[in-house]
Image (cartoon, rainbow, N blue to C red):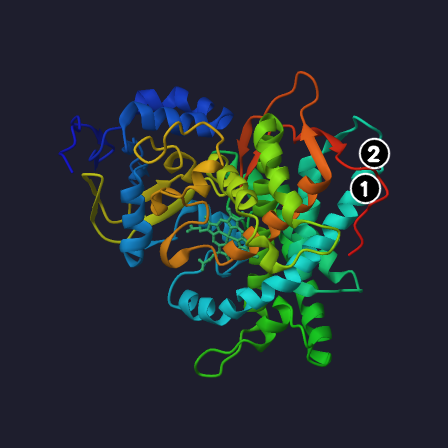
Amino acid sequence: MGMLEVPDRRYLGTRATAPGPTGPQMLPAFGAIRRDPLAYLAHTWRTHGDIVQFPIPRPPSYLVCHPDAVRRVLVERPRAYSKETIQYRALSLVTGAGLLTAEDPPWRQHRLMLQPAFHPRQLEPLVGEVELGAARLVDRWQRLAPGAVVDVERAMLRAGLETVGHALFTEDLSGDAAQLTDATLAALEVVVARARVPVTPPAWVPTPGNRRLQRANAVLDRTVARLLRARRAQAASSQPDVLDLLIAARDDRGQGLTDREIRDEIVTFIVAGHETVAAAMTWCWALLAAHPEVQARLQQEVDTVVTDAPLGLQDLARLPYARACVDEALRLYPPAWLISRKALTDDRLSGAEIPAGALIIMSPWIVHRHPQFWTDAERFDPQRFVEGGTARHAFMPFGNGLRLCIGRDFAYAEAVALIARIASRFTVSYPAGARIPAADPSVTMRPVGGLHLVVQPRHEPGLSLRA
Ligand code: HEM
């Protein structure tokens, strides 16, 4: 690694250790960041290189763009970096001390306890549930007038919520599960709104947003308490869902999770597992609609595997091109577009000294476009994943290392099954004059204005799937 040319700059007492914009350059940039954060990140990277320091004194803040440096943070020295960042502090207002925001030591203990809920044997019933959701969707779309335009993003969000809800609670006839997901999403909305303004009052100040957050959190607490009471009164199920597994989980000293810990994990799974998968599927359709030749190739594959019989987990292994389409969508539009860490000790990344306490910002959106690892990076070409050959650490839609997404296989099973089922029944295209929407990065990356596509049945109606 060569030495970095760093101009002698100081930011209110903090030494500059990497290239980056100056204070006066930053001021006009705030508007650009608010308008289009992705374009700003990419511009900053192209202008200053693989490691960029922002002129912010507390904490010193770095954008880390090179896959090797990102691997050092996430894989090689995970204990030298923590999640005590503004991003995770905001999220923990909703998710509490759930797995996504927790720090070691409770994190490791909980990860081991929760791992069984994501065991491959839990995926078989998941695929069954995705198929039921897909059948409802196929029925709805089959009844549309020819040439009808569908809000595909909404359809994917609905499917994502149904699937994660079912995996967590199976059947819940009381309506508590629906109330719980609604309250989670309401709380999340407040947190997102907070992130969009530069100065936010602390959570205890009774602003309208904070009051909404408190109300949503109170609903969450009450609803989880009710769900837990009802579930504990029931006999054990032969097909345990995630809630059953959370109630039964024990650490190596035989200790179970408290009600509060169960609440935090459930809310975490809803937050982490709903919009992310929906976003991945939405962008996959956005790209397929723009590339009819890729869509035709996908349909060729699914036609050899997908029949009127329900798909099983083993069928998904026979859909490598569908999986590659999902991967390529995750590469170009990674739903979790920003990953942050706090450096706990001094380190060196891409040749720059990083002081303890620094904020490290990593973006899969940038890493997935790094020209040293991706040829023709902007091109949608699922074939690159069929052929392999990609350095694995340059593809990180689910993070990497110890804190890798626990729901990765869950997400792939859901996305591949749903995309394959729908591609076997419909062709999607843009209405005249429309094209791939711009990306709006919030908690996940969503299409500006949604995704509206023409959905054309490929076969005669009446062959609707019966699961
Ligand atoms: C396409 C869908 C998904 C994407 C892109 C995604 C992305 C990510 C990323 C990037 C991380 C690591 C964050 C970091 O290191 O700072 C993560 C962690 C996590 N994800 Fe996912 N995720 C997805 C689906 C899911 C699903 C379906 C669930 C659960 C039902 C889930 C639950 C979690 C949890 C609990 C963590 C924290 C794991 C830990 O730290 O031990 N995710 N996810």
Provide the residue designation for mark 2. 144
Tag count: 2
Say the numbered circle drawn on residue 383: none
The picture places residue 243, in percent across and down from the top left corner, at: 63, 68
Tell me the residue that label 1 is attached to: 140
Place residue 424 in its image quadrant.
top right
Query: Which amino acid is tagged 1?
Result: Arg
Q: Is 125 placed above or below 251 here?
A: above
Q: Residues within 10 Å of mark 1 (few under 14, many from 20)?
A: few
> x and y percent of residue 64 in the render?
31, 38
Residue under the point 21% across and 48% down:
347
Q: Give the secondary structure at mark 2.
A: loop
Question: Where does residue 385 sit, x and y in percent of width and height?
Answer: 45, 41
Q: Does residue 31 appear in the picture of this structure? A: yes
The alpha-carbon separation of the residues under discs 1 and 2 comes to 7 Å
Q: Is residue 124 above or below residue 69?
A: below
Quadrant of the image occupied by residue 132: bottom right
Which quarter of the picture shows residue 264?
bottom right
Decide which of 269, 453 is in the foreground and name it.
Answer: 453
Left or right relative to 32: residue 259: right
Q: Which residue appears at 34% of the width and 33% of the height?
A: 370
Figure quadrant of the N terminus: top left
Q: Residue furthest left?
A: 3
Query: Of helix, strand and loop, which one carries label 1?
Result: helix
Q: Hey, which residue is sitting farthest front in the picture? A: 304
- Location of residue 125 with respect to 146 vertically, above or below: below
Residue 332 lies, in percent from the top left, at 48, 34
